[in-house]
Image (cartoon, coloured by chain):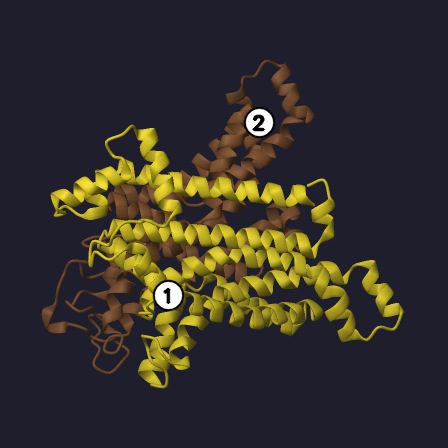
Chain colours: A yellow, B brown
Amino acid sequence: MTRFWLIKLVRTIITLWFVVTFAFIVLRTSGDPVVALLGADAMPDEIEHFRELWGLDRSLFAQYISYIGQMATGQFGNSLRDSRPVLEIILERLPATAQLGLAAFIIAAVIGIPAGIVAALRRGRLTDRIVMVFAVFGFALPNFFLGILLILLFSLYLQILPSSGTGTFLHLLMPSITLATFTAGTLARFTRSAMLEVLEKPYMRAAAARGVPFWQRVLFHALPNAAIPIVTVIGLNLGQLVAGAIVIESVFAWPGIGRLLVVAVSQRDLAVVQGLVLVIAVTMVLANLIVDLLYGLLDPRIREGAK
Amino acid sequence: MSRPNVITLLAGGILVAAVATAIVGNVFTPHLVTDQALLSRLKPPAFLEGGIAEFPLGTDRIGRDMVARLVAGLQMSLSVALAGTLIGAIFGTFVGFLAAHFRGLTEEILMMFVDFQASLPFILIALTLLAFFGNSMVLFIILMGMFGWETYARLARGVVLSARSQPYARAVEALGAGPGRLYLRHILPNVASALIVQVTLTFPQIILLETSLSFLGLGIQPPNTSLGQILGDGRDYLSTAWWISVWPGALIFLITLSMSLLGDALRDRLDPMLKTRTT
């Protein structure tokens, strides 16, 4: 058991180290990091301070070590646009993205998982077909196009929802539904296949033979066993949610870190880009670690098995 | 079980039509993509009030024919996705073969790169590289090629590891064939079906990646055009000219949907092992 947690922890640390190294290599191969992070019109004493702070007069290896130190303590430099510390800007925008992501996740789970269960129970019938058609549409529909269609319908034609911005519950509705669509489709598909597998197991027939009512069998016998693959898919989909937020926040002018990233990339505000990439990467890696641990809690076989 | 159903045929038909339009569509469009008809700006499609037959799908903000723009966008989106898919498939498979051939430390290091790329959403890596190195067509195509290579690497490695323990591979080796001959002539044909299925899964994802980035203004840059870029262009005209965004969006959707459906059908046919796991 300790071994399982330890291996996960070591892997997480290695991945984080890879992320920081990736950022360092990109930063150093793309040009002068001083110009990159402070801008071409930085003051000489500012440049001098920066060179000293980051140890740019020392060997590349020493620089690498001090870079890791800087990143680990959240010193990402200042934004080119308003020269405020990058970390401050990111922390300011983070709640909006967290709100959007959480809302989307709840919508996806509330729609996707029950839809998958129902499809599995009605395998091959019309309900199953309809759920699967929607799941495939959720996969293939580009999220930015879905967003545009929703804006056309609800903001411009029906004029009942605001097309952009934030503040009220109504503002949250379209962005979170757009973001949830892909995840809901994935969840429905995987829940269906996980349930199908479990429903054929002998213990389900045994439960039926003992006279356990139908819904009790589904909810308390089948679902917990199907939960393992579902949790894995949720973990894998965190990346999808993050990637989706980057695009969707721009569609709806949602003031989160996704929109911040797109604006920073187009203005080549490199300090902000670097800070965001590191913050997002760390968040994702940690979230994956949590999912892995959850996985171990849900299924004792994984914890104690040879894996 | 192996009958191609109506939906699969329809999906295949749409894809063939899309490719054909991209290749020869220019011949049939009366307007060049660069032609500007400033007197016919933001004309609605011909079937709506105010539309004219000269521009069946309407015009954009500087009076360019939407049909001509869509053909140009289709050409760009499909060729970029094709190039990206091929680069990723070849590179990834090569890395997988390398890892399986050398084992040991080489394998560990290569698979660490694979794990790293798999741990982050690719759009994040793409945006970082675009920000730091600046956008150019070459970098953009390389980026599309970098997408998904890790899946091919994992797949190829796994299949080679299991193939090498089989009698035919050992027989070929015993007959004195070098590793190049063994992998390319004997093992590759055996893993081809799994790789082809993976291609049908990656291709629509690369289309979505390209169109997303172009939509955000960070991908294909004017004067070049892609479906995503046209859609992004139309965002400012949603209230006055919905058709600028809706046509390219619908095209992207049709292509990715058809490719996914075709991929599912192909997977069922070529790879019965995968079928039981994911349907």
Q: Image quadrant of residue B183?
A: top right
x 27%, y 64%: residue:
B232
Vertical relation: B106 (above or below) A48: above
Q: Pick whichever, B73 or B54, lies toward us.
A: B73
- Residue placed furthest toward the right: A210
Q: Image quadrant of residue A8?
A: top right
Where residue A26 appears, as percent x and y from the top left, is: 31, 40
Residue B186: give its label. Answer: 2
Q: Does any portion of residue B21 appear in the rendered image? A: no
Q: Image quadrant of residue B91?
A: top left
How packed mark 1 is, by other alpha carbons closer than 10 Å (few <14, some 14-19, many 20 or more), is many
- In what quadrant of the picture does the C terminus of chain A appear? top right
x 53%, y 29%: residue:
B107
Residue B242: give its label. Answer: none
How packed mark 2 is, by other alpha carbons closer than 10 Å (few <14, some 14-19, many 20 or more), is some
- Mark 1 secondary-structure assignment: helix
Where residue A293 appears, as percent x and y from the top left, is: 62, 52
**From the viewer's perspective, is the residue at label 2 or at label 1 nearer?**
1
Q: Chain of mark 1?
A: A
Number of on-image labels: 2
The kind of residue tagged 2 is: His
Vertical relation: B31 (above or below) B41: above
- In what quadrant of the picture does the N terminus of chain A appear? top right
x 31%, y 70%: residue:
A253
Q: Chain of mark 2?
A: B
Q: On the image, numbered disc 1 is attached to which residue?
A: A248
- Tell me: B14 left or right of B44: right
- Mark 2 secondary-structure assignment: helix
